[in-house]
Amino acid sequence: MGKTFQKPEALTDVHTHYCPGCTHGVIHRLVGEVIDELGIRGRTVGIAPVGCAVLAYNYFSCDFQEAAHGRAPAMATGIKRVRPDLMVFTYQGDGDLASIGMGEIIHAANRGEKFTAIFVNNAVYGMTGGQMAPTTMPGQRTTTSPLGRNTEETGMPIRVAELLSSLATEGYITRQTVIKPKFINRTKKALKKAFTYQMEGRCFSLVEVVSTCPTNWGMTPLDAIKWTEETLLPYFPLGDFKTPEEAEAVSANA
Amino acid sequence: MAKVLMKGNEAIGEAAIRAGCLNYFAYPITPQSEVAEYLARRMPEVNGVFLQGESEVAVGYMLFGAAGAGERVFTTSSSPGVSLMSEAISYIAGAQCPAVFVNIIRGGPGLGGILPSQGDYFQSVKGGGHGDYRMLVMAPASVQEAVEMVMTAFPLAEKYRNPVMILGDGLIGQMMEPVEFPEHLRSEPSKKDDWATNGMDTRKSATRNLVKSLYLDPEALNNHNLLLKSKYDRMKQEEVRYESYNAEGEYQALIVSYGTMSRVCRTAIDHLKEEGIEVGMIRPQTVFPFPEKAIHEAASKENCRVVLSIEMSMGQMVEDVERAVMGKRPVKWYGKCGGEVPTPEEIIEVVKEHL
Amino acid sequence: MPTYKHEIQADRCKGCGLCVDVCPKNVLEISGEVNTKGYFPVYQARPEDCISCAICCIMCPDVAITLSEIKAEAEAKA
């Protein structure tokens, strides 16, 4: 009984700059494992966002580009259109994707661009020091909602997976989390499914991953895991919101 | 090579294909939407990529992604659209990727108007985006010249690994003129394996490539800017291009004018000549790098008493003309904007006024 | 039956404690010695209880824990 466990080849040896207990690192490892297992490192191009993961290119050993804030889906579109044979993934936080970059992600999904978007939702702007994000919870204190997010003035947190799955264009849209091993394993399956759809040239894929931000939530890593479970997951339910097979079933019955 | 009567916007689209660029991303905006309409039909015929993005912001980054992956790529837009792309242009310059932009200028500021103008001189020549980057900027005065400038823009962008801008105006885009697409201006894309993210397998390499512009270490960023500056200095050495008109002999006034505005000035110069008033003209074909030396020498001629910067704007190139003349002669601006194009008669009056 | 070597790269660990929480056999604890980065890394307090299930490896955000198989013959020679 027992298993081996090694760092995936697609990850470099560089120590990450992420805070202790920040689950960005887990997501990076899962992406690395999927790239290794699908044997695609030689033709993969990752796109780093502006946010905590801006330095993601230091942690992956495949070709990488660094996008302007919110624009990774447009850059991925550019690459896939001129080099459809390349495997492209974007890696973005909630400020990057759901605030400044909302236009880009909606239209990339709606055009059905064949890349894989990895969307890390931790309900706050991390790198810039904990400001309110589109996914910040009602009443959640951040440096720009010091008295707690007032949804009268700033609206409700945006559920990106549901929003994107309402588009008529075929795609794979799922929400996962990495706060516990069982969820981590499911996230890996979802990522592998997303990259496989891309390998088949099948459809756009987005994996939203509910993640922790101990530092900017002002919690210990373990409390952050607990808060995610008690507060975030009820509002951001997990599961596949859309799959291309489903679309096929619907059209078959139409 | 038979000449074909073509609308400027369409000729610009065809020129890119003939140059060897088969990837076009764009967003509609008057007065240059015909480029996209033309290429929407034409690119599929040559197995090229045509994509209309959701905004000029997105289009700028589609260009950046594609260029970063090592493919030739271009876009066309107009003034407000180019404003939206200027962040991407700064990133493309910072990450040292080749890409070609065409601005068919319209009246500004703000929504402005849809008629021709030269009000984006500062935006392109002085860098519309953030940071110390520059762009090689060429200003065509005819549809044929626009074709040739577009075709040469691709190897130039690759030579400098920098964005190149074609600065047209609504007239260049909208008028029809006979054009040909010189075969010798077609070029093979340069080798990009040493920097492009074109896939490790593609270049049979075990080391990955990285296209980025972030340098958190101040010394590294300063050195990076020195590297970029060395390219811009080299442009100043090797890429200055201008045309002179009636400027070989002596003249009492020197006009500096570019693009379609310079054609109106030619007519004025011809009429003044008939009245015995000699006026010379320097027409910058590149507005960055600016032909400072040529203008300085032309202004310093014995009988030349005044230099006139004539532009379809409220006076932008005039600042560069003043810099070039260095006080040797008085430098005056004359121009109109909003889509109004000064007439030869007006220019004749202005010249006489200053003599 | 192969056995596994459980390794913690102390200098990669940031002492976040997530692995300590998820270990089904309560093997791990935060150590008292600080690592090169100023964090207190985790260590196997009760290695004999470890069942090489890799759950700690799966939870670790910094890929600081690895499990490698110890070849049976090597063991026989030792």
Image (tube, grey):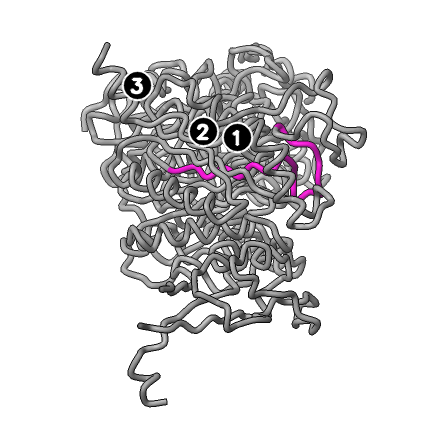
Whole-angstrom CA distance, mark 1 to mark 3, is 22 Å
Q: Where residue C29 sits: x, y (%)?
A: 62, 65
B176 or B218: which is nearer to us? B218
Q: Could you classify mark 2 by the number of other residues whose Cα lies within 10 Å: few (under 14), some (14-19), or many (20 or more)?
A: many
Secondary structure under the numbered disc 3 in the rendered image: helix
State the residue position of label 2.
B59
Q: Residue furthest bottom?
A: C77
State the residue position of label 1.
B85
- Looking at the rendered structure, the kind of residue marked 1 is Met
Q: Nearer the viewer, mark 3 or mark 2?
A: 2
- Range of the magenta residues? A116-134
* Discs 1, 3 touching: Cβ within 8 Å: no
* Discs 1, 2 touching: Cβ within 8 Å: yes
User: Chain letter of disc 2?
Assistant: B
Residue B326, located in which quarter of the rendered image? top right
Residues at marks 1 and 3, common chain? yes
A1 or B176: which is nearer to us? A1
Task: Quadrant for the C terminus of chain A, please.
Answer: top left
Residue B49, located in which quarter of the rendered image? top left
State the residue position of label 3.
B38
User: Is residue B46 shown above or below A43?
Assistant: above
Residue B75 image label: none
- Looking at the rendered structure, the kind of residue marked 2 is Val
